[in-house]
Image: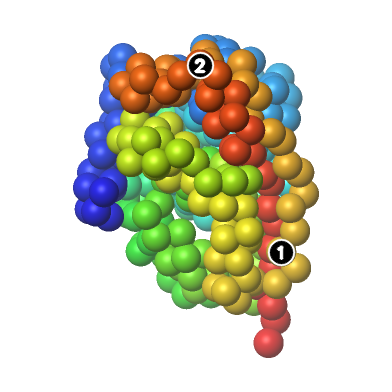
Amino acid sequence: MKESEIRKTVREGYARVAKKEDSCCRPAKSCCSNTSDPGELSKDLGYTQADLDSVPEGSNLGLGCGNPVALASLKEGEIVLDLGSGAGFDCFLAAKKVGGRGKVIGVDMTPEMLDKARENARRSNSENVEFRLGEIENLPVADNSVDVTISNCVINLSPDKKRVFQEAYRTMKPGGRLMVSDIVLLKELPEVIKTSVEAYIGCLSGAIMKNHYLNAIKQAGFQQVKVLKETKFPIKYMINDPTAKAVIEKTSIPSKDIEEIADTVASIRVSAIKPIH
């Protein structure tokens, strides 16, 4: 698929998620879980009940694959940027940690998601959170203005991941911290998955090899690039995931091959630092 087609497909898919329409693109489930309850999924990923209770209702859509806010060790007064902020779940958690002297900027390319996030911010009186329309490959954020950049299972959807990390680097202050949770490949996917629209929206075919992902971060200029945690994609999650089901049905993948496909996918949590020159 062309880059423009990929963005259009992803945008339309996540618009349906925002509007809670039934679709193949993870309407109530993440590609990382077999539960339809966003709260239970979030607990599996490292969020606490206190986290869930502290955010506006409707901000947690269960679309992540980790907890970058916890990894980021946020401090009061810091400026945080969330790439692909969705309905604002991680933004609202980050906002509580940075306090009134800090600020959180969420960037998302789906207007329906932005509408949902802004409404959540209004209802919760979250004055230190701002949501901006934009693509993560071309961030509407000033140079050297962000202390911490987070992202949760979004960069895998980008057709130009190198550009995403270059933009993250540009917008971060020297000494700034990058903390992302994402989906990567441990070996190449079958061609039928790579070319599947459903798999792209569901984070499968958009994922790249783990070493290429880490190299893209390093090539952008980041240092101290570390994988803090790596988890295999459990086969039961793939069997229950609506996106995976759609892919399997559409491509007629033999059941004996499903487990092999699941073994190619992993969730990783990565940290990096923008050096002080």
Position of residue 113 measured from the top left corner of the image (x, y, whole percent): 34, 35
- Quarter of the image for the C terminus: give it: bottom right
The part of the image, by quadrant, that contains residue 53 is top right
Q: Residues within 10 Å of mark 1 (few under 14, many from 20)?
A: some
Q: Residues within 10 Å of mark 2 (few under 14, many from 20)?
A: few
Q: Is 261 drawn above or below residue 83 in the view shown?
A: above
Q: Is 10 drawn above or below residue 270 in the view shown?
A: above
Which residue is found at the position 40% from the left and 51% from the top?
158
Position of residue 36 measured from the top left corner of the image (x, y, whole percent): 52, 12
User: Is there a contact, CB below 8 Å, between mark 1 and mark 2?
Assistant: no
Give the numbered dot on residue 24: none
Tag nearer the camera, 1 or 2: 2
Disc 1 secondary structure class: strand
Which residue is found at the position 25% from the left and 34% from the top?
12
Work out whether residue 193 or residue 164 is closer to the camera in this orientation and state it.
193
Work out whether residue 132 or residue 109 is closer to the camera in this orientation and state it.
109
Position of residue 63 measured from the top left corner of the image (x, y, whole percent): 50, 29
CA separation in Å, label 1 and label 2 = 37 Å
Disc 2 secondary structure class: helix
Res. 131 visible in picture:
no
Res. 35 visible in picture:
yes
**Left or right placement of residue 59 versus residue 35 in this view:** left
Which residue is found at the position 42% from the left and 22% from the top?
253
Q: Earlier in the sequence, mark 1 or mark 2?
A: 1
Amino acid type at circle 1 is Val
Q: Is 46 drawn above or below residue 178 in the view shown?
A: above
Q: Which residue is mark 2?
A: 255
